[in-house]
Image: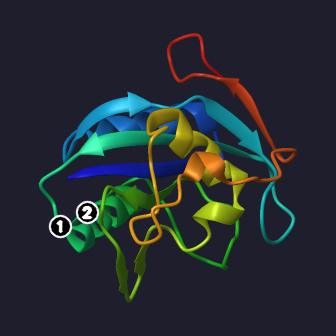
């Protein structure tokens, strides 16, 4: 199964946290591509800016099992859920799965607000430029979105942010 995972952090060494999360995802899936890194304004209460990225993966895990594995990674990396849309050390989201929809407790694929949020859509398009909504067939690249709150700041290689 081809999927795109969104990765975000706005606490601590954000870039190092993104890199660590990617390494941990490699234990459950094959990482095929990594997006650019975007610095983005937070959604929700006042808090520091985020670094956001996405990875395209191949996995044999079913969508729910994939989400459970991502939640376990978040927990292992110290994620504590205190308030909705609050600051976080790490955030891992299933943004899109090729040809798959899912709407159950704790998991909606494609991500419920993917088409509204530049911090999710721009990294997704970096790693899956051909991605389409699995029901409507609409290309995500055709969506007009306000990009002003997201600016590319580099990559996650050794010289990245």
Q: Considering only vertical position in the picture, is 12 above or below 133?
A: above
141 vs 41, left or right, is: left
Q: Position of residue 30 (x, y in %)?
A: 21, 37
Q: Nearer the viewer, residue 54 or 156?
A: 54
Q: Which mark is residue 66?
A: 2
55 vs 159, left or right, is: left
Q: Position of residue 139 (x, y in %)?
A: 53, 52
Is residue 53 visible to us here? no
Disc 2, SS: helix
Report the mark closest to the observer, 1 or 2.
1
Q: Position of residue 73 (x, y in %)?
A: 34, 56
- For the point 12% across and 54% down, the residue is 60
Check disc 1 and report the residue beneath it: 62
Q: How many numbered marks does the figure carry?
A: 2
The image quarter in which residue 88 lies: bottom right
Q: Residue furthest front?
A: 137
Count neighbours of disc 1 (C-alpha within 10 A) and say few if under 14, some if 14 to 19, many if 20 or more. Answer: few
Q: Considering only vertical position in the picture, is 144 above or below 137?
A: above
The image quarter in which residue 114 lies: bottom right
Q: Are marks 1 and 2 in contact (CB under 8 Å)?
A: yes
Q: Considering only vertical position in the picture, is 90 above or below 58?
A: below
The image quarter in which residue 86 lies: bottom right
Q: Considering only vertical position in the picture, is 118 above or below 54?
A: below
Measured Cα–Cα span from mark 1 to mark 2: 6 Å
- For the point 29% across and 42% down, the residue is 57
Is residue 34 visible to us here? yes
Q: Nearer the viewer, residue 91 or 114?
A: 114
Give the position of the C terminus as an image quadrant.
Answer: top right
50 vs 131, left or right, is: right
- For the point 62% across and 70% down, the residue is 113
């Amino acid at each position: 199964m081809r999927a795109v995972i969104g990765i975000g952090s706005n606490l601590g060494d954000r870039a190092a946290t993104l890199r660590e999360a990617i390494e941990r995802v490699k234990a459950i899936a094959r990482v095929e591509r990594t997006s650019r890194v975007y610095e983005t304004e937070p959604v929700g209460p006042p808090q520091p800016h985020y670094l956001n990225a996405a990875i395209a993966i191949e996995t044999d895990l079913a969508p729910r099992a994939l989400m459970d594995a991502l939640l376990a990674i978040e927990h292992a990396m110290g994620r504590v859920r205190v308030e909705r849309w609050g600051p976080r050390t790490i955030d891992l989201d299933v943004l899109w799965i090729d040809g798959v929809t899912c709407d159950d407790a704790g998991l909606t694929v494609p991500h419920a607000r993917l088409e509204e949020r530049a911090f999710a859509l721009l990294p997704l398009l970096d790693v899956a430029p051909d991605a389409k909504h699995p029901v409507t067939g609409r290309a995500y690249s055709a969506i007009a979105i306000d990009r002003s709150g997201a600016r590319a700041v580099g990559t996650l290689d050794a010289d990245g942010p």
